[in-house]
Image (cartoon, helix red, strand yellow):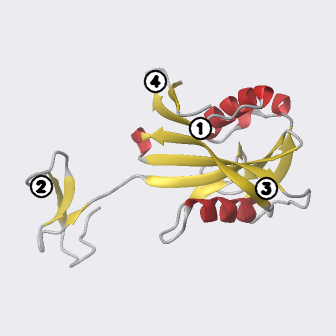
Amino acid sequence: MNFCTQCGAKVTLQIPEGDDRPRFVCNGCATIHYENPKMVVGTIPVMENKILLCKRAIEPRRGKWTLPAGWLENGETVTTCARRETKEETCAQVEELRPYILVDLPFINQVYLFFRARLLHHDFQAGTESLEVKLFNPADIPWDELAFSAVHETLKFFCEDLKKAEFPFRIIDINPHEKGSIFCAEKRISK
């Protein structure tokens, strides 16, 4: 951030009085600009134990597979966002949304929330942000072609849970490891 959204003056990074971390503070009007994590919301659309994935038509990670998901908009509920993103990316309708996993990615200031969802019909196709949409058996998921670590970890848990037909809600933290791999800490919330 370079300029204040209130008055247009330059901002500087400093720790405001009574705070414990650097914030952008306006040099003109003294407005403190708080930046908070972005929330990504999506679904794990399932039909007959197959998972609907979409191949990204946009950057980042164009051409890689992912679950339908996207940014939560102001004034939107998480379930509305999950349905909207699923419709936009796969032209699919889902129902029976159940919270499944919350993924914290503090190193990039993002939080993912995925819902389990029942795919209503086979009438799906690539939306404007997808190159291709396909139902995958868990054994056929293109693991090396997944777009994001949050999607990879979500699918890994989901495929294991699918075998047991038990779907506990989880909160996981993903942090980059020194060698570029992923460290994933899991917290099970319910059975």
Please state, as top left, top right, bottom left or bottom right, where the C terminus lies in the image. Answer: top right
Q: Is residue 61 visible?
A: no
Residue tagged 3: 131
Residue at 18 percent across and 73 percent down: it is 9
Q: Position of residue 46 (x, y in %)?
A: 80, 46
Q: Position of residue 160 (x, y in %)?
A: 73, 26
The image quarter containing residue 85 is: bottom right
Q: Secondary structure beneath disc 3?
A: strand
Q: Amino acid at mark 2?
A: Pro
Give 60 or 82, whichever is nearer the viewer: 82
Whether pointer 4 and pointer 2 mark residues with C-beta atoms closer than 8 Å, the reply is no
Residue at 85 percent across and 58 percent down: it is 120
Instruction: State which mark lies toward you, 1 or 3.
Output: 1
Q: Position of residue 67 (x, y in %)?
A: 70, 47
For label 3, the crowd category at 10 Å Cα-Cα, with few meaning under 14, some 14 to 19 and many 20 or more, is some
Residue tagged 2: 16
Q: Secondary structure beneath disc 4?
A: loop
Residue tagged 4: 177
Query: Residue 169 — which label?
Result: 1
User: How far is mark 1 from mark 3, CA to CA?
Assistant: 31 Å
Seen from this angle, which residue lies furthest bottom?
A: 7
Q: Secondary structure beneath disc 2?
A: loop
Q: Amino acid at mark 4?
A: His
Please state, as top left, top right, bottom left or bottom right, where the N terminus lies in the image. Answer: bottom left
Q: Amino acid at mark 3?
A: Leu
Tell me: 95 left or right of 48: left
Seen from this angle, which residue lies furthest front?
A: 191
For label 2, the crowd category at 10 Å Cα-Cα, with few meaning under 14, some 14 to 19 and many 20 or more, is some
